[in-house]
Image (tube, grey):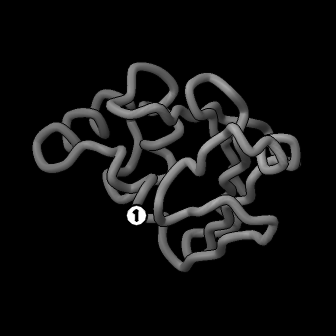
């Protein structure tokens, strides 16, 4: 199992977890959820108390990744399987992303 903290404009918004290669979960942090001034991180992930579950990496997070030759190069330089989208997300979306969302890998026991 792997997990990342999700930040919106530097504010902790929730946890994205890869339970296995076919099961992903996103859940908003309780404090972020109750603060009405904080927006949803994505239109496809509106603020709710429920967990979002998917059999593939949520499109919002997948779209933060490079494609084509850039993805191949990043995979090679970082020594991460090109098909490991979650691993690439953890490695490259920590800083300087196109949007307001960044990730921070966390240790899960």
Q: Which residue is mark 1?
A: 59
User: Which residue corresponds to the image point at 81% horizontal and 65% vertical from the top-left?
Assistant: 49
User: Which residue corresponds to the image point at 74% horizontal and 53% vertical from the top-left?
Assistant: 28
User: Which residue corresponds to the image point at 41% horizontal and 42% vertical from the top-left?
Assistant: 80
Q: Position of residue 18 (x, y in %)?
A: 64, 60
Q: Position of residue 57 (x, y in %)?
A: 48, 64
Q: Residues within 10 Å of mark 1 (few under 14, many from 20)?
A: few
Q: Residue furthest left?
A: 69
Instruction: Indicate left or right for 39 with 36 as reference.
Output: left
Instruction: Indicate left or right for 21 with 84 as reference.
Output: right
> Which one is nearer the viewer's eye here, 1 or 102?
102
Q: Position of residue 104 (x, y in %)?
A: 63, 31
> Which one is nearer the viewer's eye here, 18 or 49?
49
Q: How many marks?
A: 1
> Which one is nearer the viewer's eye here, 20 or 44?
44
User: Which residue corresponds to the image point at 60% horizontal and 45% vertical from the top-left?
Assistant: 39
Q: Secondary structure at mark 1?
A: helix
Residue 109's place in the image compared with 78, above or below, is below
Q: Position of residue 43 (x, y in %)?
A: 47, 60
Instruction: Indicate left or right for 48 with 70 as reference.
Output: right
* Quadrant the N terminus occupies: bottom right
Residue 60's place in the image compared with 35, above or below, is below
């Amino acid at each position: 199992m792997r997990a990342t903290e999700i930040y919106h404009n530097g504010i902790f918004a929730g946890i994205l977890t890869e339970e296995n290669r076919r099961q992903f979960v996103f859940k908003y942090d309780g404090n972020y959820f109750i603060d009405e001034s904080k927006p949803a991180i994505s239109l496809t992930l509106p603020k709710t108390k429920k967990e979002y579950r998917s059999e593939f990496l949520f499109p919002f997070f997948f779209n933060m990744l490079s494609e084509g030759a850039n993805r191949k190069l990043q995979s090679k330089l970082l020594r991460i399987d090109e098909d490991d989208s979650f691993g690439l997300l953890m490695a490259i979306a920590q800083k300087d992303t196109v949007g307001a969302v960044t990730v921070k890998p966390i240790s899960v026991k």
